[in-house]
Amino acid sequence: MKVMSFNVLVGGEERFDEIRSIVAAERPDLLVLQECVGWEDGGRLRELAGAIGIPGGDGHLVVGTANRRPSGRRYDVCLASRAPILRRAVHAPPFMAHCAVEVELASPGRGDPLLVLGTHLVASDEDARLAEADELLRLLPPELLAVRDCLLVGDLNGLSRHDPYPDDLADRLAGAGIDKYGRPPRFEVMDRLEKAGWVDALRARPRSSRWATAPRGGAGVLVDTRSDYIMLSQPLAARLEWADVVETGTASDHHAVVALLDGH
């Protein structure tokens, strides 16, 4: 089973052909997309599903309607699954900037269904992200992560202390005018998720040396960061074969993340 997370950047309308080509080349079995602005009618998601051979009905697709941003836009989270969706829910409490899509997927021969959360955490600051991370841990608590196959997929907008950031990261972020991680930069969101039992696929079994998904810059300073993650519960991590970053060129300001799981 191949899993893919991809932030398409504010709907990707004028870049949709590029987005479709990237997704089609990877042909994931589970696709989670963020910033699906203007996708509420499901048409764009059905097009992408068709490009990778996933049925276009409600049994395989979810458009997660996000809370409105101050701009009035909804940065929806979308999910497409080759395996049938047995249960779905979209969680958008007022304190979340966007939403979380929760599904249970049929997993023939594996016993219990696969539990999946697809989401996009807020970019603004670490304290707001921590509140959203706590909501994710309420939905899939540590005691469940210890015994069930679970996936957390999406743009988590947090820094992992296990990524190869330079010693002068704080100075680089300040020089580029990037404040969303705090000064000095904070790592609590990813620390909290990992302490609860989530395993970072890209750090557990990287297929290559690629790791940055969100190169950012300003004032002539370029900083490699990672916002995008595929996280696994401990039982599922045992079946991880590899994970990698897929470069997306001009299709988005984020690179995609993919992971291959054995036995699903």
Image (tube, grey):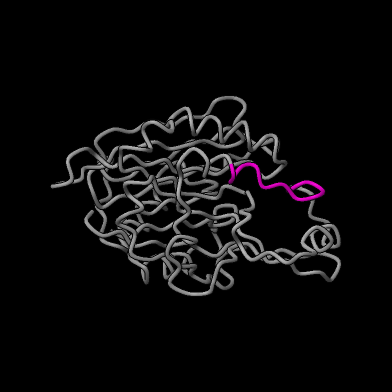
Q: Residue at x 54, y 72 (%)?
A: 210
Q: What residue is at 59 percent from the left and 71 percent from the top?
A: 250
**x then y, percent, for residue 149:** 31, 43
* Residue 59 in the image: above or below residue 34: above
- Which residue is rendered at x = 28% and y = 42% of the image? 114
Q: Residue furthest top?
A: 94
Q: Residue furthest left?
A: 109
Q: What main secondary structure does the magenta stretch of the protein show?
A: loop
Q: Residue at x 68, y 64 (%)?
A: 165
Span shown in magenta: 181-191
Q: Nearer the viewer, residue 131 or 55?
A: 131
Where is residue 170, by image quadrant?
bottom right
In the visual, does 240 lie left or right of 202?
left
| Front position in the image: 160 or 146 | 146
* Observer-nearest of 215 and 40: 215
Q: How many marks?
A: 0
Query: Is residue 11 covered in magenta?
Result: no
In this image, 113 relative to 178: left or right?
left
Q: Position of residue 138 (x, y in %)?
A: 47, 27
Quadrant of the image occupied by residue 59: top left
Q: Quadrant of the N terminus?
A: bottom left
Q: Position of residue 223 (x, y in %)?
A: 73, 66
Observer-nearest of 171 and 86:
171
Q: Position of residue 222 (x, y in %)?
A: 76, 69
Horizontal side, residue 15 vs residue 101: left or right: right
Left or right: 145 in relation to 130 = left
Position of residue 196 relative to residue 138, above or below, is below
Above or below, 54 relative to 109: below
